[in-house]
Amino acid sequence: MKLWKLLKNNIPRTSALSHGSRMLKVGVLGAGRGVGTTHLALMASNYFANGLGYKTAVVECNGHGDFVKLYDETKNMDGDMRCFSKNQLNPKLQKFMLGFASGIMIAASVWSLLIPSMELAEEKGMVKYIPASVGFLLGIGFLLLLDSVIPHLHLDSNQPEGVKSSLSKSTMLVLAVTLHNIPEGMAVGITFASAMMNDTSISVAGAFSLAVGIAIQNFPEGAIISLPLKDRGMNKGKSFVMGVLSGVVEPIGAVLTLVFASMISSILPYFLSFAAGAMIYVVTEELIPESQQGKHSNIGTIGVAVGFVVMMVLDSAFG
């Protein structure tokens, strides 16, 4: 109670601030872990936002990740208060990155996979929309199965998905990213397999443009997974390694798909649309919903548009 009286009596209201002192910094220090410092900082910030009318930001500087654990408490508070941790991405930047990755994958699915699937099916004397439709739905079903079986944890969520497991939250975060890297690797592998065959409309340059597009959107993905791991107490080196390992499945998946698809050329149209379906599942089930959470969802939408155009230009210029 003494603290609140001190705050109330000594912190001016926004109307009393002069033009030269619009920013006020308040530090809250604790004697150690578990003494209530984080809770006190959040309570004080909520008071500044609701009681005094300030636009308030809370910054954690100890690297313990306590704000991540208390995020659900702060996001439901009234007033204009934001909760950031030192090692977290800016929420607006994260929304844009997720949207950008979504746009890349949507454009790649259409321009580099589904359209070539129908063209190749027609060249082989098939009804062009059948392989595209069947393969697409099988790809959706395959990722749905993996999503139901593999234990994983999405960003900004404390509720694991998949089968029950004793894995740590950090490991399940990595598995979530690894899960949606699988179709990306498949897409690259199948396009290179198609390019290696003379009777397909996919060129090596087109396959390379898809690989470049996927690689571009992997950079923000790596940051999105590595920084939250650092925020949960993992050291920088291990956070970086875990981020890299989450993407190792891509080249492995690409090589395996390349070898297998090259052996059975007659079902290449199905493989192409299968990879498209798997990528669209990841986009609609994970990336877009995460980019639309909370305020400023339009930033995620802008990211989708930019990513789509980038991939479309790459495919049109080099395909």
Image: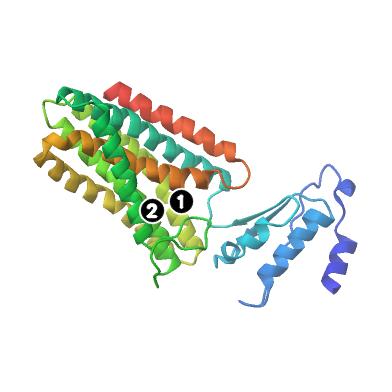
Which quadrant of the figure contains the C terminus?
top left
User: Residue at coordinates 22% horizontally, 51% vertically from top-left?
Assistant: 252
Number of residues whose C-alpha sits closer than 10 Å to that of mark 2, classed few (under 14), some (14–19) or many (20 or more): many
Q: CA separation, marks 2 and 1?
A: 9 Å
Q: Is residue 283 left or right of residue 159?
A: left
Q: Circle 1 sits on which residue?
A: 224
Task: Judge by depth and name the residue closer to the eye, 233 or 178.
Answer: 178
| Residue type, numbered disc 2 | Val
Q: Which label's residue is closer to the chain start, 2 or 1?
A: 2
Q: Circle 2 sits on which residue?
A: 177
| C-beta proximity under 8 Å, tags 2 and 1 | yes
Q: Is residue 245 above or below residue 258?
A: below
Number of residues whose C-alpha sits closer than 10 Å to that of mark 1, classed few (under 14), some (14–19) or many (20 or more): many
- Say if residue 184 shows up in the picture: no
Expressed as whole percent of the image width and height from the top left, the position of residue 303 reads: 49, 35
Examine the image and state in which quarter residue 297 appears.
Answer: top right
